Image (cartoon, rainbow, N blue to C red):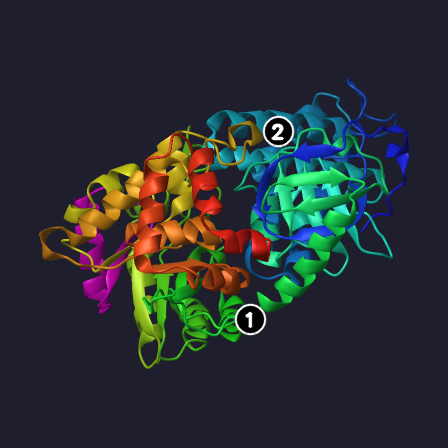
């Protein structure tokens, strides 16, 4: 952690109110602290120091890269869930062979190691950004990593969260994944960034930590340290020098947030219609916390988290132990386990090809079975062994399914492994459009709204300028969800449709999803109580009416506004 130098004190407050995209609810008042200035760029054309050989400089670079990787890996050990996954992925980038090799080449041509890694990372980041989709997110990781390596080479502190003895609201252009993942909620009251999108690392981690957060609030990083502001994480607003009304809202939120931390373990509507509320988890530690929070099982177990930082495929024994730890946390409950979603933003050396021209549309998820047959079958065998003797009701689903033919093949693999309840993710528009055909071969589907939105709207979910497009409130995305539910009821199927994407954690959108016919919702454990409270305020016919209004709205903003206006409980609870 760095102590903020206060170098931003010369900035002037350009406005009294800022509008951004609310990504995590909450109303708080506090002083802001800006993220420290980034590590300065090495001088353009900076050459090797006199008396330093290229061999020595290359060795120093490799040592620095390895040190950064070790540091990030060590930090990941103290994190959990999404935060741990982010740190592990960033640690891998720190010593990425492509990045280091490009820097070494520049050093042999006379560049200093600092300048070499700076330029090499810029080239890699540009390549990733141009690929779009998930890979654009990795560009941010690369630029964060290069600053850490330069700091290591210079012997200065790496970028980090400013230190403060008192709570504060953290403000910056954007937050590096490695920093966002280790925020201390006891000190950080809220997060505000001037860039980023609703599915950025900042947004996802904020929701997991229960921190109010606003992204894409242009100009907010021009505020000065110590400025007192009011943050409304649901409305996406930031107000400088708040008054009595804002003080009252913040005080009310303290009471509300305490109440919203408790979920009774049964998701239901006001008329008694049951909607099981499950949790998304990355491993046994997450599962234990979700069970303690009252989750009605697991709607998404991300198995790729067990594979990160591996150059080789985990053994059968390792996989069985990882899965069994989750199953044991939910005896008698449903646990939906997703097979490897490797590729794009989760590359695995033994399974994916980092040189693909467009990994977001490439060999990822279920498709890795095309190029590396056997890995999926062995994973299913491990899941079956872990489920054998477990009291959990284990369901298995494959990501990135595009056709009924693929669903049929996956169901066959599950049957061969002795797994009785196969399903698939609906995150590709083609799968939503052909849900009826897909459900001839599997027993359930689960909507991955993050990817479904990104692919349907052709909008990179990490880009702030595209935040208005990249929201599951888009009527087009809601129509795809409606078509999926309709497909689940065609031909006498009547098979369940769940949602395990970030949309399920939005209480207002949860009402719409249930109104569209979604049977179960899965989310971060922190969102369970809030979603349950709002669902409990409406009947099924009322939810259906709100869904119909959202479907016919002119825009995503209109859909969200119309629904929220008819759910006064949201404003009352500050959601």
Location of residue 277 in the rendering, given as x and y in whole percent from the top left corner: 41, 65
Location of residue 100 in the rendering, given as x and y in whole percent from the top left corner: 63, 35
Contact (CB < 8 A) between labels 1 and 2? Answer: no
Q: CA distance from mark 1 to mark 2?
A: 51 Å
Look at mark 2 in the image and give the residue it sits on.
Answer: 102
Look at mark 1 in the image and give the residue it sits on.
Answer: 262
Q: Quadrant of residue 20?
A: top right
Instruction: Tally the marks.
Output: 2
Location of residue 226 in the rendering, given as x and y in whole percent from the top left corner: 86, 43
Q: Quadrant of residue 442?
A: bottom left
Relative to residue 159, is residue 442 depicted above or below? below
Relative to residue 170, is residue 282 depicted above or below? below
Q: Residue at x 13, y 50 (%)?
A: 490
Relative to residue 73, is residue 392 depicted above or below? below
Q: In the image, which residues are magenta? A: 399-425
Q: Nearer the viewer, residue 93 or 510?
A: 510
Direction left: furthest residue: 491
Q: Residue at x 83, y 30 (%)?
A: 52
Q: Quadrant of residue 393?
A: bottom left
Q: In screen coordinates, is 32 left or right of 20?
A: right
Can residue 28 be seen by looking at this rendering? yes
- Circle 1 — which element? loop
Q: Nearer the viewer, residue 28 or 105?
A: 28
């Amino acid at each position: 952690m760095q102590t903020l130098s206060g170098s931003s004190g010369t900035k002037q407050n350009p406005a009294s109110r800022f509008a951004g995209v609310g990504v995590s609810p909450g109303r708080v008042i506090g002083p802001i602290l800006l993220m420290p200035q980034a590590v300065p760029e090495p001088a353009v054309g900076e050459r090797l120091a006199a008396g330093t050989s290229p061999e020595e400089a290359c060795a120093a670079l490799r040592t620095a890269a390895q040190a950064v990787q070790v540091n990030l890996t060590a930090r990941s050990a103290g994190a959990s869930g999404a935060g741990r996954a982010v740190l592990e992925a960033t640690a891998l980038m720190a010593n990425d062979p492509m990045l280091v090799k490009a820097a070494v080449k520049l050093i042999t041509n006379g560049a200093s190691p600092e300048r070499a890694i700076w330029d090499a990372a810029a080239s890699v980041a540009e390549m990733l950004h141009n690929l779009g989709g998930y890979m654009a997110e990795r560009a941010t990781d690369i630029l964060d990593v290069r600053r850490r390596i330069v700091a290591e080479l210079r012997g200065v502190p790496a970028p980090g969260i400013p230190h403060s003895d008192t709570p504060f609201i953290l403000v910056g252009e954007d937050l590096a994944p490695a920093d966002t993942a280790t925020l201390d909620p006891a000190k950080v009251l809220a997060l505000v960034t001037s860039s980023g999108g609703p599915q950025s690392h900042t947004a996802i981690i904020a929701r997991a930590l229960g921190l109010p957060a606003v992204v894409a609030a242009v100009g907010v990083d021009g505020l000065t340290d110590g400025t007192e502001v009011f943050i409304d994480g649901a409305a996406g607003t930031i107000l400088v020098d708040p008054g009595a009304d804002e003080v009252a809202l913040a005080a009310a939120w303290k009471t509300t947030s305490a109440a919203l931390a408790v979920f009774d373990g049964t998701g239901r509507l006001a008329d008694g219609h049951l909607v099981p509320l499950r949790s998304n988890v990355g491993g046994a530690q997450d599962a234990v916390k979700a069970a303690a929070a009252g989750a009605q099982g697991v709607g998404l177990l991300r198995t790729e988290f067990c594979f990160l930082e591996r150059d080789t495929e985990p053994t059968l024994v390792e996989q069985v132990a990882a899965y069994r730890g989750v199953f044991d946390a939910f005896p008698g409950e449903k646990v939906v386990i997703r097979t490897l979603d490797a590729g794009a933003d989760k590359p695995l050396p033994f399974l994916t090809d980092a040189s693909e021209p467009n990994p977001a549309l490439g060999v990822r998820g279920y498709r890795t079975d095309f190029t590396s047959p056997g890995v999926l079958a062995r994973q299913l065998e491990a899941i079956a062994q872990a489920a054998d003797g477990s009291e959990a009701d284990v369901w298995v689903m494959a990501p990135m399914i595009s056709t009924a033919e693929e669903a049929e093949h996956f169901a066959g693999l599950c049957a061969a492994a002795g797994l009785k309840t196969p399903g698939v993710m609906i995150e590709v528009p083609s799968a939503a459009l052909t849900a009826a055909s897909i459900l001839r071969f599997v027993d359930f589907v689960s909507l991955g709204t993050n990817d479904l939105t990104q692919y349907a709207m052709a909008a990179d979910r990490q880009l702030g300028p595209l935040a208005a497009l990249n929201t599951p409130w888009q009527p087009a995305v809601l129509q795809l969800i409606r078509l999926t539910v309709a497909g689940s009821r065609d031909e006498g199927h009547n098979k369940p449709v769940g949602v395990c994407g970030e949309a399920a954690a939005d209480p207002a959108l949860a009402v719409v999803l249930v109104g569209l016919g979604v049977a179960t919702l899965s989310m971060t454990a922190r969102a369970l109580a809030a979603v349950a409270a709002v669902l409990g305020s409406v009947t099924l016919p009322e939810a259906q009416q709100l869904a119909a209004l959202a479907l016919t709205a002119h825009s995503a903003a209109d859909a969200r506004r119309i629904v929220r206006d008819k759910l006064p409980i949201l404003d009352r609870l500050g959601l």
